[in-house]
Amino acid sequence: MPRPETEILVDLAIASIDALSPSRRPVRLLDLGTGSGAIALALQHARPDAQVDAVDASADALVVAEANARRLGLPVRFAQAHWLDGAAGGYTVIASNPPYIAADDPHLPALKHEPSSALIAGADGLDDIRQIVQNAPDHLAESGWLLLEHGHDQAAAVRQLLETRGFAEVQSRDDLAGIQRCSGGIWRTVK
């Protein structure tokens, strides 16, 4: 079960898929940094007609994700990779809950249940998001969406990264507390 913040990302991904493919045509989805597989599995459950791929750099995380997929009987395809390295193209939606915590964040000592590599992304917490935003267009279908979970104070910076890269319809969504926690944009090669 995804965390509440991640549920917003999953809901946004499903809404994007439904808007792009209202006829329930098969779509391709990619979950970057899948961890336990919560995003990929929720998307596969919501859209059984979709091809869902999930990648993570951690072999240990993939063992957990694959076990969860088997337990739930969901045909998600898993691969070990660093973000988009070796990924195919043509994805309708790329969704990610990447590390987004700054290296000196005072909340880090309380976050002991996950490895630091799954949490910290450079001095401002945006290193991994920058890399994903830069490289995602090469892997998106025409009018495909890139959707990212981020920190409570990063929405404006993430929207700026997306707009600077050339994404359209850039927007953020609030979590249940009214804090913008997910941002995304659509990639159009025909402008």
Image (spheres, rainbow, N blue to C red):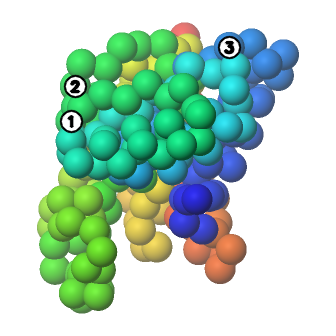
Label 3, residues with CA under 10 Å away: few <14, some 14-19, many ≥20 = some
Which quadrant of the view contains residue 73?
A: top right
* Secondary element at image label 2: loop
Q: Quadrant of the C terminus?
A: top right
60 sits to left or right of 132: left
What residue is at 37 percent from the left and 29 percent from the top?
78
Q: Is residue 87 visible?
A: yes
Amino acid at dot 3: Pro
Residue 174 image point, x, y percent: 64, 66
Amino acid at dot 2: Asp
Q: Earlier in the sequence, mark 2 or mark 3?
A: 3
* Secondary element at image label 3: loop
Residue 82 marker: 1
Amino acid at dot 1: His
Residue 123 image point, x, y percent: 15, 67
Label 1, residues with CA under 10 Å away: few <14, some 14-19, many ≥20 = some
Which quadrant of the view contains residue 57?
A: top left
What residue is at 31 percent from the left and 41 percent from the top?
62
Q: Is residue 183 visible?
A: no
What distance separates the C-alpha of mark 2 from that of mark 3? 24 Å
Which quadrant of the view contains residue 102?
A: bottom left
Find disc 3 in the rendering and name its residue: 26
Q: Quadrant of the N terminus?
A: bottom right
11 sits to left or right of 37: right
What distance separates the C-alpha of mark 2 from that of mark 1? 6 Å
State yes or no: discs 2 and 1 in contact (Cβ < 8 Å).
Answer: yes
Residue 85 marker: 2
Q: Nearer the viewer, residue 25 or 77?
A: 77
Q: Earlier in the sequence, mark 3 or mark 1?
A: 3
